[in-house]
């Protein structure tokens, strides 16, 4: 059973990861 803090950290990491990929896509699109 995960602690609430661990669950929140995983959610935040996943959210940042998704936003990070989105930012990379935007930057690559701008360079084209």
Image (spheres, rainbow, N blue to C red):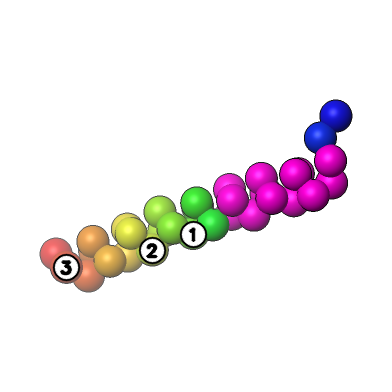
Q: Is residue 31 magenta?
A: no
The answer to whether the residues at label 1 and label 2 have Cβ atoms under 8 Å apart is yes
Between 31 and 7, the one lying in front of the other is 7
Residue 13 vs 19, above or below: the answer is above
x and y percentages locating residue 25 in the rendered image? 32, 58
Q: Residues within 10 Å of mark 3 (few under 14, many from 20)?
A: few
Residue labelled with disc 1: 19
The residue depicted at 49 percent of the width and 59 percent of the height is 19
Range of the magenta residues?
3-15
Q: Give the Cα distance between marks 3 and 1.
A: 18 Å
- Outermost residue to the bottom: 30
Residue labelled with disc 3: 31
Between 19 and 1, the one lying in front of the other is 1
Q: Residues within 10 Å of mark 2 (few under 14, many from 20)?
A: few
Q: Secondary structure at mark 3?
A: helix
Residue 27 vs 20, above or below: the answer is below
Q: Main secondary structure of the magenta part?
A: helix
Residue labelled with disc 2: 23
Task: Please identify the quadrant where the C terminus is shown.
Answer: bottom left
The residue depicted at 28 percent of the width and 66 percent of the height is 27
């Amino acid at each position: 059973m995960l602690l609430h803090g661990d669950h929140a950290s995983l959610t935040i990491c996943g959210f940042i990861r998704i936003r990070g990929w989105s930012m990379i896509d935007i930057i690559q699109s701008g360079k084209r």
